[in-house]
Image: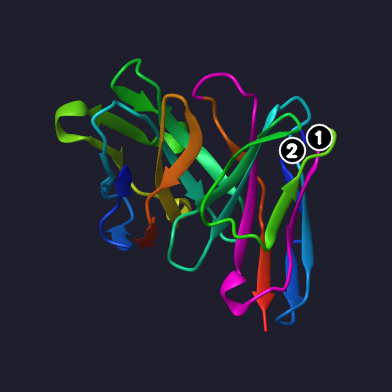
């Protein structure tokens, strides 16, 4: 049973650069979620997909952020023109998509913007 | 606004002593409730969840939590702490028709030998 995987695990970039993260969910899971976690805080919801459809976006997701799940399998999260405030752990989770189902989390991608 | 409160960011407990982590939520509608654990350099792992069945929920690693509607609480307990319980613990809530999880700020548990 392979869990949720995320790549890269760490990313260091300079302010103003674009970065893209990838999430591979558990294979039979229909729902995919992105969260952001900063130091000393719990994860905060960013967006989620039901298959390939992006159904909800948080107000935290500024215009510089875009997420896709083109074939309903893996997802990418892109941040354009990164800012130091974007430094955080970006978490991906997936779930079967039935009722109050359990979300299974990946190990996260830690972004550092210099 | 609906929110989740976890008090005391750092919790120290002696090995063999009771572990008690408090979680309160604000909502007039009973939510679904979860406790997750996060070990260093690992993703969040589900400990247990409440979804309107039995109010006392048993989870992995000897943890359990009790849903108390009148107190809007879902406190996590373990009778006897083990060194391997040192980790960060998050309470999370979701509401019917809303798939997002709202997390508390977390409790960093330190187990003292």
Residue A15 vs residue B19, the one in the foreground: A15
Specify how the rendered protein is coloured: rainbow
Q: Give the answer, above or below, for where B73 lies relative to A57.
A: above
Q: Give the answer, above or below, for where A24 lies relative to B104.
A: above
Whole-number angstrom distance, CA of label 1 to CA of label 2: 7 Å
**Residue at the location (32% across, 46% down)?**
B4
Image position, residue A44 (x, y; %): 49, 53
Mark closer to the chain start, 1 or 2: 2
Would residue A41 appear left or right of B16 to someone viewing this image?
Answer: right
The residue that mark 1 highlights is A73
Give the number of the disc on residue A25.
2
Helix, strand or loop for disc 1:
loop
Quadrant assignment for the C terminus of chain A: bottom right
What is the chain letter for disc 1? A
Is residue A84 shown in magenta?
yes
Question: Are the residues under badges 1 and 2 in a single subunit?
Answer: yes
In the figure, residue A82 lies in which quadrant? bottom right
**Residue at the location (50% across, 53% down)?**
A43
Image position, residue A37 (x, y; %): 53, 60
Instruction: Look at discs 1 and 2 and give the one toward the viewer.
Output: 1
Would residue B42 appear left or right of B83 to someone viewing this image?
Answer: right
**Residue at the location (40% across, 22% down)?**
B51
Q: Which residues are magenta?
A: A73-100
Image position, residue B93 (x, y; %): 39, 37
């Amino acid at each position: 049973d392979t869990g949720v995987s995320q790549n890269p695990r760490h990313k260091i970039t300079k302010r103003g650069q674009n970065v893209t993260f990838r999430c591979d969910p558990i294979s039979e899971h229909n729902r995919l979620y992105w969260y952001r976690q900063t130091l000393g805080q719990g994860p905060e919801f960013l967006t989620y997909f039901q298959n390939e459809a992006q159904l909800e976006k948080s107000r935290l997701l500024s215009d510089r952020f875009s997420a896709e799940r083109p074939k309903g399998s893996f997802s990418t999260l892109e941040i354009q023109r990164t800012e130091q405030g974007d430094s955080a752990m970006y978490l991906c989770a997936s779930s079967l998509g039935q009722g109050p189902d359990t979300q299974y989390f990946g190990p996260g991608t830690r972004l550092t913007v210099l | 606004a609906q929110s989740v409160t976890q008090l005391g960011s750092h919790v120290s407990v002696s090995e063999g002593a009771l572990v008690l982590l408090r979680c309160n939520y604000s909502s007039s509608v009973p939510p679904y409730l979860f406790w997750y654990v996060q070990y260093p350099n690992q993703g969040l792992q589900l400990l247990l969840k409440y979804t309107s069945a039995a109010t006392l929920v048993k989870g992995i690693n000897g943890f359990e939590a009790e849903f108390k509607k009148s107190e809007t609480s879902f406190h996590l307990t373990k009778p006897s702490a083990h060194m391997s319980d040192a980790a960060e613990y998050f309470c999370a809530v979701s509401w019917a028709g809303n798939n997002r999880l709202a997390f508390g700020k977390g409790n960093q548990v330190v187990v003292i030998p």
